[in-house]
Image (cartoon, rainbow, N blue to C red):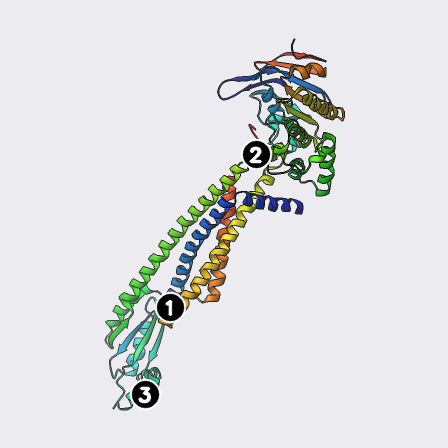
Amino acid sequence: MFHVFKTFPNKIHALWDINIHIKKGEFVFLVGPTGAGKTTLLKLVYRGILPSKGQVIVDGVNLSRLKLPLVPYLRREIGIVFQDFKLLYDRNVFENVAFSLRVVGTKNIVIKQKVNEALNIIGLYQKKNTYPHLLSGGEQQKLCIARAVVSRPLILLTDEPTGNLDPETSWEIMKLLFKINIWGTTVVVASHDKLMVDKAQKRVIRLEQGEVVSDTRKGIYAK
Amino acid sequence: MIRNILFYIKEAFLSTKKNSIISLATVICLTATLIIVGVFLIISFNIDVFITNIESQLTAIAYFKDNLPEAEVQKLVNEISALKGVKEVHYISKEEALQRLREDLAEHEDILAGLPENPLPSSLEIKVYETDYLEEIANLIGQYKGVEEVNYGGELTRSLMMIFNFIRKAGVGIVLVLLTISILIMFSVIKISVHSREQEIEIMALVGATSWFIRWPFIIEGFLKGLLSSLVAFFVLSKAYKYFINQVREIIPFMPMGMEQEFVIKVGILLVLLGTLIGIFGSMLSLRKISYEEL
């Protein structure tokens, strides 16, 4: 990201002159208080929004110049895990994960293989016929991760993945994310979970009121 | 490709099942509208049949004075043939007129037996191109010396035609209004169904489905609802029309009406075409833009 500004119609400056470079295969925490602009930054990466000023470049593509019909193809390279899960509650675990492959036209046999593989890694294979509302918060979060990584994306964006979970489950989720990172996916985690960030010892970018206030290797949550 | 189509169809059915009450309401609304449209189509077709029938009979008859010399008759025939708007002129001699009357009376031929001489005048059957010419031509011919009298359908025919033309035009207007309404119904219903599947659409957009991939299930849903509605409407209409036509034929045996075969093909094709187009168009309208922004 080069000199990225984002101003919303209500004149709030969500992001102010952001310059971040995340290398392929990195694991990055995006920290800061609520309203610091973490979610906005993630949205810029998957082109949920466009910057008001500046350039966002993902995998060599300048998103401001990316034509709308090509946005889906960018999205296929990015896995996203949302704070509010965004699961389909009328479909079972298997179908939720399969959904993201189906809509990009994957063959059934490949879908079956990939989904089972992802569920095995995530640890939800036993519950593949269960419906999401019967899962615990941690399991639902895992399901979201499975859906995001089943297509083997280049980048995984996660927004508060440990939001409402107990420390033990949170760490489990973190370990999953590390695993995914080790396999080559660039992982960006927006979080205000101090405990997890400190324990992880990864690169930490701190946002405050839309500005980057610190960017440290093997960082901790607070300065 | 086939895999995708199967996915679209599956999703379309899933959506219909999910919103079963709304789906049912749509089909009923659309069926009702299509039935009304169909009724107007049938009326319009029948008016066409009727008008064609009348138009083929647009004839004025000029009766000649008795004992008009042959040369005079020939002269009149030539003059009348040359008039503007005259399509065809056919001379009927006294003998031919009597012959026709005999044929018409058939079994009651004995009525004619007592006649001392042929009382029928020779005449000219004048066919015109359009009703509008009829009165003008008839008046003109009436002024010729050798012509005793001119008869033509006149006022009755003309007012009948005017009424029919009015009904036809009004029918087109009503059909247009109904079609607009039904597209709007389809539009709102698909909108509801889109709304109820907002999250699925959002997720599709987020995991990289193209906008057309997202649209297709809804378009198919609209198409299927349109198809179902038009088939139901057609079934109801064809049954009702068959009954109606039988009733009419019992009262007026020679009433010119659209034949069943013709009706089945024309109205059927039109209704299915209309129904499916309304379905598809309504869906497209409610899905003009898939948003990839601000998710």
Q: Amino acid at mark 1?
A: Val
Q: Secondary structure at mark 2?
A: helix
Q: Nearer the viewer, residue B100 or B173?
A: B173
Q: Nearer the viewer, residue A133 or A38?
A: A133
Q: Which residue is mark 1?
A: B248
**Residue at horizontal 60%, vertical 46%?**
B9
Task: Specify whether B118 is left or right of A19.
Answer: left
Q: Residue B149's image quarter?
A: bottom left
Task: Specify whether A34 is left or right of B49.
Answer: right
**CA separation in Å, label 3 and label 2:** 86 Å
Q: Which-is-in-front pick, marks 3 and 1?
A: 1
Q: Residue B153's image quarter?
A: bottom left
Q: Nearer the viewer, residue A192 or A207?
A: A192
Can you say whether B36 is above or below A64 in the image? Answer: below
Q: Are marks 3 and 2 on the same chain?
A: yes
Q: Secondary structure at mark 3?
A: loop
Q: Are marks 2 and 1 on the same chain?
A: yes
Q: Chain of mark 3?
A: B
Circles 3 and 2, Cβ within 8 Å, touching? The answer is no
Q: Is residue A131 visible?
A: yes
Quick one: label 3, few (<14), some, or many (20+) residues within 10 Å?
few
Q: Which residue is mark 3?
A: B109
